[in-house]
Image: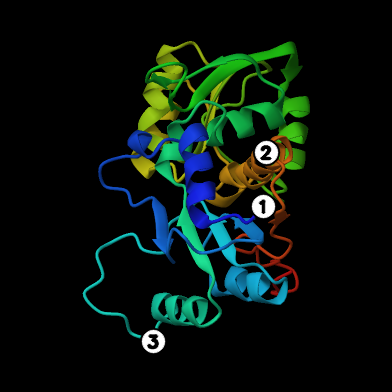
Amino acid sequence: MVLSIRDITDFLETIAPMGLAESWDNVGLLLGRPDQEVHSVLIGLDPSLQLLDEAIERGCDLIITHHPIIFHPLKSIATDAPTGIFIQRALEHKIAVIGCHTNFDSAQDGVSDALAARLGLLDTSPLVPGEDQTGLGRIGLLDPPLSSKAFSDLLFDVLCLPTLMVAGKLPEQISRVAVCGGSGSELAETAQAMGADLYLSAEIKHSTARWAEDAGFCIIDGTHYATEFPLVELLAAKLVRHSTTRGWNIDVKQTKRETPPFTHINRTTGEQP
């Protein structure tokens, strides 16, 4: 069976409808044409030149990323700037690009669900409910509860981070956890109001961190990349299952090269890893 980009976007519409995207967002097919044939897809978080080169080297004709390659309206395409280089190179190699951003944030079994599942949270529900279990963020239970040390160890393993940024005091025992993959500073007070012992998200504002201190609440900034990267595996698994049931002949690949944009300089050596 010959697959087209339209087949893929139709599938994505079933798991993360574009109608769930925020009004300011840009999702869907952002580069390429709907009737273009697709044989191999690479899934990553960011539409970077590194990811594009990986797609070229691994023989992919479609890239699906969480963050969109075209976010703000383009007044020009400068082919000596990163976005222009990406667009030109992708077109030269006939690689289509799909963005699945805030629609996948709010979708049932979406970005925050992937993070919650990695943490082992049970009985999860949205922090900001939509319809039919859609909505932003998730809150759920750890059973059994974990000590602060055990939970910290779990976070280090799940997020693959050398350090954790914590505002407020980490509770001695943790059972009810709220999460929001990506930028979620504005949901901190919601998490506390819903009875969370702590809130895990990213890009926490300074004022929100100060509020947590004064409110006796704990917020952990797990970085934008680390809290969203679990969606790569989740989306790949969903596409593989769908392909198998439909008899699609498509090779689904997860990025092997994508890494966090920030690194940590070692104070002793002054070197980056």
- Of 26 and 37, nearer the camera is 37
Q: Residues within 10 Å of mark 1 (few under 14, many from 20)?
A: few
Q: Is residue 216 left or right of residue 24?
A: right
| Chain-order first, disc 2 or disc 3 | 3
Residue 147, quarter of picture: top right
- Numbered disc 2: secondary structure: helix
Which residue reaches farthest front?
1
| Chain-order first, disc 3 or disc 1 | 1
**Residue under circle 2?**
246
| Chain-order first, disc 2 or disc 1 | 1
Q: What colour scheme was applied to this rendering of the protein?
A: rainbow
Q: Which mark is residue 1?
A: 1
- Numbered disc 3: secondary structure: loop
Q: Is residue 134 left or right of residue 95?
A: left
- How far apart are labels 2 and 3 at the CA level? 39 Å
Residue at the image point whose x is 38% and y is 43% from the top:
205
**Residue under circle 3?**
79
Residue 41 appears in the rendering: yes
Q: Position of residue 45 (x, y in %)?
A: 56, 54
